[in-house]
Image: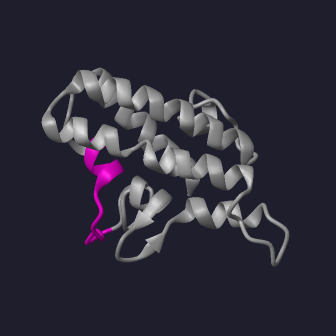
């Protein structure tokens, strides 16, 4: 699931680089509502909701995955993967805000900062750390 979310994040980056501040890539990453039909990857939510979760339905697969890296019975809070995930999850809001305001320049800068946070997170959860790794294409 995280790999599929990275693919959508990369698609969002390509859309931002093309000057888009709305459209399919934005919807596939940011929609917070359940879909009537699963997307092309099979999700009923979008990448951000799948990765981070929603206010209505709680945490997404990021927290669940981080929990698998901790010894049974131990809390995830305070671990490096949890801390990296929290930084990552907060890095998406500036991208969304820039898109809503139609500012592709700000969206590009915000996406770049989020990309660094995403790579940091991926590097500590035993997935390829580079967003350009072939697994994410």
Horizontal side, residue 15 vs residue 128: left or right: left
Among all residues in the image, which is located at the extreme left? 101
- Camera-nearest residue between 39 and 65: 65
Q: Residue 134: x and y, percent? A: 62, 31
Judge whether 40 appears above or below 132 on screen: below
Q: Residue at x 50, y 32 (%)?
A: 115
The answer to which image quadrant residue 91 occupies is: top left
Q: Residue furthest right?
A: 71
The image position of residue 73, as x and y in percent, is 81, 78
Q: Is residue 28 above or below residue 44?
A: above
Q: Name the residue rendered at 29%, 30% in the picture.
A: 107
Residue 36 on the magenta span: yes
Q: Is residue 42 left or right of residue 19?
A: right
Magenta-colored span: 25-37
- Quadrant where the N terminus is found in the figure: bottom right
| Horizontal and vertical percent position of residue 78 | 71, 58
Can you say whether 70 is above or below 29 in the image? Answer: below
In the image, is 90 to the left or to the right of 81?
left
> Relative to 92, is 64 on the left or the right?
right
């Amino acid at each position: 699931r995280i790999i599929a979310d990275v693919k959508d994040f990369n698609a969002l980056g390509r859309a931002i680089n093309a000057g888009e501040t709305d459209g399919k890539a934005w919807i596939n990453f940011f929609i917070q509502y359940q879909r009537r039909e699963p997307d092309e990857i099979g999700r009923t939510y979008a990448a951000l909701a799948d990765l981070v979760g929603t206010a209505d339905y709680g945490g997404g697969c990021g927290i669940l995955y981080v929990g698998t890296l901790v010894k049974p019975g131990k809390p995830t809070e305070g671990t490096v993967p949890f801390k990296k995930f929290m930084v990552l999850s907060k890095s998406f809001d500036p991208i969304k805000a820039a898109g809503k305001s139609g500012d592709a320049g700000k969206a590009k800068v915000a996406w770049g900062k989020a990309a660094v946070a995403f790579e940091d997170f991926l590097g500590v959860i035993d997935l390829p750390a580079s967003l350009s790794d072939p697994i994410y294409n």
